[in-house]
Amino acid sequence: MPTYEYHCPANDQLVTVVHRMVEDLYTWGELCARANIDPGSTALEAPVAKKIGLSTLTRSSNMGCDTGPPIDNAPAMSGPFVNPNAW
């Protein structure tokens, strides 16, 4: 399963979690439950934004093939669930 980073603007925390590609987390409460961390004083309803970048790219070395070099220094990519103004 892929690794994703989520940013919470309410507390400016960046949290890394693993989940299926078809899943998305939308609130701080969902993110804390998935990451098994204490939400602290941040409201559970606070929105989070998925940060898409190197953490979601697959390296060829992880795919069981050696057809090309790993992806290094790839730029962050925007997507339908990303708020670029959240960071």
Image (tube, rainbow, N blue to C red):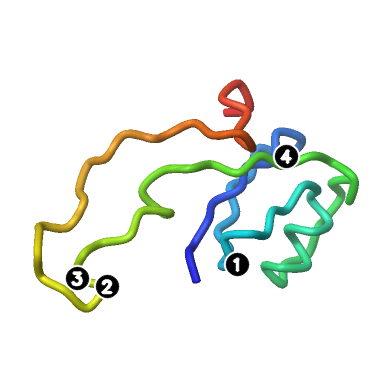
> Badge 2, how many Cα within 10 Å: few under 14, some, many 20+?
few
The first of marks 1 and 4 along the sequence is 4
User: Which residue is label 3 attached to?
Assistant: 61
Q: CA distance from mark 2 to mark 1?
A: 18 Å
Q: Which residue is mark 4?
A: 11
Depth check, mark 2 against mark 1: the one in front is 2
Q: Which residue is mark 2?
A: 63
Q: Earlier in the sequence, mark 1 or mark 3?
A: 1
Q: Label 2's element?
A: loop
CA gap between label 3 and label 4 equals 35 Å
Please say if the residues under marks 2 and 4 sit with CB atoms less than 8 Å apart: no
Asked if residue 20 is positioned above or below residue 78 in the image, the reply reads below
Name the residue at 54% across, 51% down. 5
Image coordinates for residue 61, horizontal then vertical, percent: 19, 70
Q: Earlier in the sequence, mark 2 or mark 4?
A: 4
- Mark 3, Cα crowd under 10 Å, few <14 / some 14-19 / many 20+, is few
